[in-house]
Image: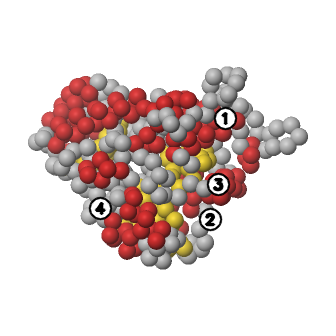
Amino acid sequence: MSELSPETVAVHAGRPSEGPLSPPVVLASNYRTYGYTREEGSPTWEAFEAAVGALEGGESVAFGSGMAAIAAVLEPLPVGARVVGPAVGYTVTRGLLAERAAAGRLELASIDLTDTDAVLSACEGAALLWVETPTNPLVGIAELDRLCEGAHAAGAAVVVDATFATPLLQRPLELGADVVVHSATKFIGGHSDLLLGVASAKTPERAAALRHARGTLGATPGALEAFLALRGLRTLAVRLERGQASAAVLAERLASHPAVSAVYYPGLPSDPGHERAARLMNGFGAMLAFETADATAADAVCERVRVLTHATSLGGVETLIERRARYPEEVAPEALLRISVGLEDVEDLWRDLDRALAG
């Protein structure tokens, strides 16, 4: 399907050649004569994996959650391996890396991923570079092509968490990454009703290692979750188009709002990541963040919104707002609010935000 656009691939990839138009849910733990689902997989998982793999340009492996995929990628690292990871990134990923470093399982260097020279300098002697781009929650853009080239020159493998971008806006394997991971719970599933992860590898050998880790760690996905994620993938293009368009409007208006001190969205020409995102991505995404005057004002916004929903997670049809205060102040401000823009009318969203900011 390489001659088709990614939007078309998302609709058609992973469908059976005969029988039902959509792959059915197969509820089975084992099969006659031979075959055990934990080890061999299931037709429902395989349909989802085939669709994501077609989008990523690699071989995909589904997991029970995004964190299960992340843990499986880290599992084969030898004890004491040096890992370069994000100073700003998904809280649980950073926590997992820090826990393994504290236990002596790996040596961790936490670096600002948007500082290309600092990252490449830290890659000397590293076994793995873990990149998240765009970053959570500041929507920073890593210079992925240069990082992949430089890390490989230093002997490090490159793994990219591209959850914010989705396979439609960014294709890390084509930019040189060895593995790309997504929390399919988010934009791929798209309806806040499942937990699932997926990792896509450039080579069959890496994909086999991921499957082995999935089986031995018990990180297997549910059949219903895989079915729902594949169904969500079919509408990803239209959902992302709407959310991205609304995110651009909200970011522009927030940037001129008197109660907002800073906006983080690569679609703004003034954003530090704008040029990189324009060069490396096919769009600026549906995630943005902004700062208010202080933490009290940020909390008040979350309490006042009525159309936006104050909740954790992202990528669903509903617009979510969340206070992100889990970072040292020098890394991310205490008064930071992150928004995942959904499918509501943008004017309804803006009126709600404007009212909440005004008090």
Q: Residue lying farthest top?
A: 20
Q: Earlier in the sequence, mark 2 or mark 1?
A: 1
Of badges 1 and 4, nearer the viewer stands 1
Find numbered disc 2 in the image and state the secondary structure of the residue it sits on: loop
State which mark lies toward you, 3 or 1. 3
Residue 268, percent across and down?
A: 21, 45
Could you classify mark 3 by the number of other residues whose Cα lies within 10 Å: few (under 14), some (14-19), or many (20 or more)? few
| Count of residue discs | 4
Q: Residue at x 47, y 28 (%)?
A: 235
Q: Judge by depth and name the residue closer to the eye, 96 or 2.
A: 2
Circles 2 and 3: CB distance less than 8 Å? no
The amino acid at mark 3 is: Pro
In the displayed structure, would residue 64 be above or below residue 116?
A: above
Residue at image mark 3: 204
C-alpha gap between disc 3 and disc 1: 20 Å
Q: Nearer the viewer, residue 235 or 170?
A: 170
Q: Nearer the viewer, mark 2 or mark 3?
A: 3
Give left or right: position of 42 versus 59. Answer: right
Residue 270 at x, y percent in the picture? 18, 49
Secondary element under disc 3, as helix, strand or loop, is helix
Q: Which mark is residue 44?
A: 1
Q: CA distance from mark 4 to mark 3?
A: 38 Å
Dots 3, 1 in contact, CB < 8 A: no
Of the image marks 2 and 3, the number of the one nearer the N terminus: 2
Judge the density around disc 4: few (<14), some (14-19), many (≥20) Cα neighbours within 10 Å. few
Q: Choose the circle earlier in sequence order: 4 or 3.
A: 3
**First in sequence: mark 2 vs mark 4:** 2
Residue under label 4, please give it.
331
* Residue 291, x across and y down, in percent: 22, 48
Which residue position is annotated with label 2?
76
